[in-house]
Amino acid sequence: MKIIIIAGSLFLVLSVCLLQTELQIFPPITTYAIATGQNHLGLDKFGIREIYPTKENGREWYVDMENPKEDENFSITFNPNITRQDDGSWRISAPVVRMNIKTLEGETNWKNVEMTGYAKIVGVIANSSNKVIENDLTWYARGGKHNQEIPCEATAYMGGLYDNGKVGWKKELWFVGGYTDERQSNKVTNSLIDRWIGWKVVIYNINNNSEVKLESYIDNTNTNYWVKVTDLVDDGGWYAKMPDSHFFDADCSKDKDFVITNSGSTATFRSDNLIWDFKNLSIREIEPDKTSFQ
């Protein structure tokens, strides 16, 4: 497998050996060119490489690294404490973390988005319940609040990255009985414990807004070098796994394989059962017909 990097007129071809476990070969790396000799470098406010450029006059949000909670768009469900670290990052520790980026009056809801963040998992919190809950970081969008009082508002595409290096996508059609099985579940790297990685999820409509494209990327070496690790389309047939009798109890007027082409008021950076540091979180409304590498 080869990756081609373009830097001005210099072409450098790198051979990449895919890791292998006893169970599977890690998924193939997507080949693309990174152009650095042009006026537009494809870098965001934090200097992080963009996959897709921001839409003209599109909405952008960047975490306030000096004091995240000072931002009125930013809230943390259950309000766990965050503490500043010596390197300027912030540590959060709770079994359930939901860092929400809301839409204020006059702002555009989140729809076609690129969500980016850097994370270092410091430890895993023991799960005391009988439920099987995986230890994961998940960025998601295309819904609103996720609670039982307004279950039908909780729609989302969820791009997950697990502490053991596995990735995958889930869809949520209502809270809590509208989850699908995971798609494109693959192990793409080694353990994430005690090292910085970057994680991106990209969600955008295609085919006249009838289908949704889902992509995720990892910066596995904390060097701003991004590799695509999932690429799929929701064109229907991706069903909620609950029985009909339970799924339709919520009366959300959605099919069990509903394609979430709508926008949503809230996008969320989520974790389960983790102690982790975060920095440089962002969400941008993107122009999916272009790439920042052109």
Image (cartoon, rainbow, N blue to C red):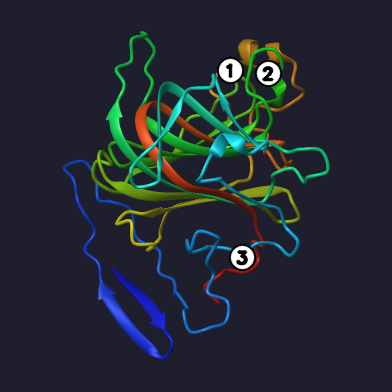
Pick out the residue farthest to the right. Answer: 106
Check disc 2 and give the amino acid type.
Pro
CA gap, disc 1 and disc 2? 7 Å
Can you tell which of label 1 and label 3 is closer to the viewer? 3
Q: Earlier in the sequence, mark 1 or mark 3?
A: 3
Q: Which mark is residue 176?
A: 1
Q: Where, quadrant-wise, is the N terminus in this rendering?
A: bottom left
Image x and y of residue 62, in percent: 58, 49
Circle 2 Cα neighbour tier, 10 Å, few/some/many (<14 / 14–19 / ≥20)? many
Q: Earlier in the sequence, mark 2 or mark 3?
A: 3
Q: Are marks 1 and 2 in contact (CB under 8 Å)?
A: yes
Q: Earlier in the sequence, mark 1 or mark 2?
A: 2
Residue at figure coordinates x 61%, y 36% from the top left: 70
Q: Which mark is residue 53?
A: 3
Residue at figure coordinates x 69%, y 15% from the top left: 248
Q: Which residue is disc 2 drawn over?
A: 151
Image x and y of residue 273, in percent: 37, 24
Pick out the residue farthest to the bottom. Answer: 9
Residue at figure coordinates x 32%, y 37% from the top left: 121
Q: Where, quadrant-wise, is the C terminus in this rendering?
A: bottom right
* Residue 173 in sight here: yes
- Label 2, secondary structure: give it: helix
CA gap, disc 1 and disc 3? 34 Å
Circle 1 Cα neighbour tier, 10 Å, few/some/many (<14 / 14–19 / ≥20)? some
CA gap, disc 2 and disc 3? 33 Å
Check disc 3 and give the amino acid type.
Pro
Circle 3 Cα neighbour tier, 10 Å, few/some/many (<14 / 14–19 / ≥20)? many
Horizontal side, residue 188 vs residue 32: left or right = left
Check disc 1 and give the amino acid type.
Val
* Residue 158 in sight here: no
